[in-house]
Image (cartoon, rainbow, N blue to C red):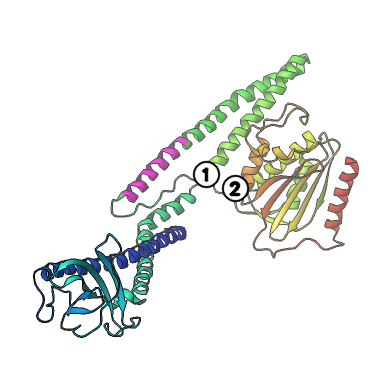
């Protein structure tokens, strides 16, 4: 139960207490008036027949009676009011026979009512009594509680205690009921598409929450089976396609050596591209299966240098600014695949050159691949990491891209606990961040005068000049 719900219940409760207390006081006074009125009516019946020769006897719980004439003289009274002045001088209005009043000893001008006592008085006019035209008064004591401020305090205090007990009971009770639901929620948060083998805990008792957990586990099992079938299909299809594609590529290469025909060259290019797509699909299937990442100690700068040198002839020259000693842990071949994809992307879309920067940023290792091409539009900086997403023709150099390179690179980065994102230009800027080897001390950004830092600044300035 939320604080807002408890607050709402509190407002409703206190409003109810206010209404009930007001109605209770009004109803209690009405009951006293009805009791006195009934006694006054019975008194008029008695004085219609004869006069009293002594004190007026009590009737039920009504102890006070007076018969008063028009001049205000008391003609008859009960034993307690014998010799006392009239209780009240209130008279009914024209056309009425009843009058109601409330008198208290501390406010009365007479001594008819003892100090500290309040009476609820009801009078009835009787024009044909044995005394002549008179007023027959009957009065009852008003309980002290009705005129004491203690009653509202008691009611509101009880409401506050009740609200506190209700809030605690609700919090405790709902908390015990929803505790299994919270455990189910935590278990579900730990389940990802890469690992659907987990199941949520089924609480004991066989109640609705337990049935919910069983249903969730059944759904997870069906989902795991469907995903596994999909992964197996992609993997099997990729494996089955590799052999005929390799054979087709070999035949096309042999035929191209003999004929030197443009159609054969185009067919061979398509075969190369199809083979690359199949390789990418196979890699995606392996990444989706999420096998354990190898925990190798890798010098990130050395790995970048190796990948740049292995690329051989490329469309654009590649320069690098590498800070030495940036060590990460992970799968060497897969991180090399990330760098290859980033370099290929920059080579495809750059104008004149590509620059790679490797640096340490506290507990992170950062690789930045920058090209001087038109850059990635802000609205596409997340979409380029979706599978089979390609930019429009204004940025595309050729049709060789499959739209899987950057998604594969991000999946590998995330499997290593890192991130891959597209930054702001100028040009295209892709930034890979990985956790540094925890066995190495955290290194801040290189100080001024550091050769690596100067090299990075020089490379960036060169790129900016070429952009201009």
Task: Give whichever of discs 1 and 2 has the lower sequence position.
Answer: 1
Residue 360 higher or lower than 280, as above or below: below
Callout 2 secondary element: helix
| In-front residue for pair 301/147 | 147
| In-front residue for pair 363/16 | 16
Would you identify the image quadrant in which residue 352 lies?
top right
Counting labels gives: 2
Q: Quadrant of the N terminus?
A: bottom left
Q: Quadrant of the C terminus?
A: top right
Instruction: Please give the label number shown on residue 194.
Output: 1
Q: Position of residue 261 (x, y in %)?
A: 77, 14
Q: Which residues are magenta?
A: 208-226
Q: Residues within 10 Å of mark 2 (few under 14, many from 20)?
A: many
Residue 463 higher or lower than 453, as above or below: above
Q: Residues within 10 Å of mark 1 (few under 14, many from 20)?
A: some
Q: Is residue 220 covered in magenta? A: yes
Q: Main secondary structure of the magenta part?
A: helix
- Identify the residue under disc 2: 415
Q: Position of residue 442 (x, y in %)?
A: 70, 64
């Amino acid at each position: 139960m939320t604080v807002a719900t408890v607050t709402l219940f509190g407002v409703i409760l206190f409003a109810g207490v206010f209404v009930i207390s007001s109605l209770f006081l009004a109803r209690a006074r009405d009951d006293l008036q009805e009791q006195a009125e009934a006694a006054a009516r019975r008194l008029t019946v008695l004085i219609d027949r004869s006069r009293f020769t002594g004190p007026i006897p009590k009737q039920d719980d009504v102890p006070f009676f007076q018969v008063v004439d028009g001049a205000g003289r008391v003609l008859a009274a009960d034993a307690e009011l014998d010799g006392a002045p009239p209780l009240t001088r209130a008279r009914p209005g024209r056309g009425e026979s009843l009058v109601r009043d409330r008198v208290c000893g501390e406010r009365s001008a007479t001594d008819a009512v003892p100090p500290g006592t309040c009476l609820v008085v009801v009078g009835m006019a009787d024009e044909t009594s044995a005394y002549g035209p008179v007023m027959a008064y009957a009065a009852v004591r008003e309980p002290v509680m009705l005129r004491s401020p203690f009653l509202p305090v008691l009611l509101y205090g009880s409401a506050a205690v009740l609200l506190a007990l209700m809030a605690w009971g609700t919090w405790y009770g709902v908390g015990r009921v929803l505790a299994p639901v919270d455990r189910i929620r935590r278990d579900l948060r730990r389940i990802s598409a890469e690992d659907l083998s987990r199941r949520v805990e089924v609480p004991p008792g066989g109640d609705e929450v337990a049935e919910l957990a069983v249903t969730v586990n059944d759904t997870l099992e069906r989902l795991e089976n469907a995903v596994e079938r999909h992964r197996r299909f992609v993997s099997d299809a990729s494996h089955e396609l590799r052999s005929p594609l390799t054979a087709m590529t070999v035949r096309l290469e042999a035929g191209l050596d003999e004929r030197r025909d443009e159609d054969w060259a185009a067919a061979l290019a398509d075969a190369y591209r199809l083979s690359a797509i199949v390789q990418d699909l196979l890699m995606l299937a392996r990444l989706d299966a999420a096998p354990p990442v190898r925990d190798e100690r890798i010098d990130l700068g050395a790995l970048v240098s190796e990948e740049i040198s292995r690329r051989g002839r490329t469309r654009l020259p590649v320069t690098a600014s590498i800070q030495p000693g940036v060590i990460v842990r992970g799968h060497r071949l897969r991180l090399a695949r990330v760098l290859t994809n980033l370099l290929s992307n920059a080579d495809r879309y750059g104008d004149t050159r590509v620059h790679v920067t490797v640096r340490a940023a506290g507990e992170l290792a950062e690789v930045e691949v920058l090209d001087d091409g038109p850059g990635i539009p802000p609205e596409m900086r997340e979409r380029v990491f979706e599978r089979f997403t390609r930019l429009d023709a204004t940025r595309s150099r050729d049709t060789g891209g499959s739209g899987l390179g950057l998604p594969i690179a991000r999946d590998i980065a995330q499997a290593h606990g890192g991130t891959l994102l597209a930054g702001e230009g100028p040009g295209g800027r892709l930034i890979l961040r990985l956790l540094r080897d925890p066995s190495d001390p955290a290194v801040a950004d290189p100080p001024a005068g550091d050769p690596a830092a100067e090299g990075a600044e020089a490379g960036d300035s060169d790129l900016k000049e070429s952009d201009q």
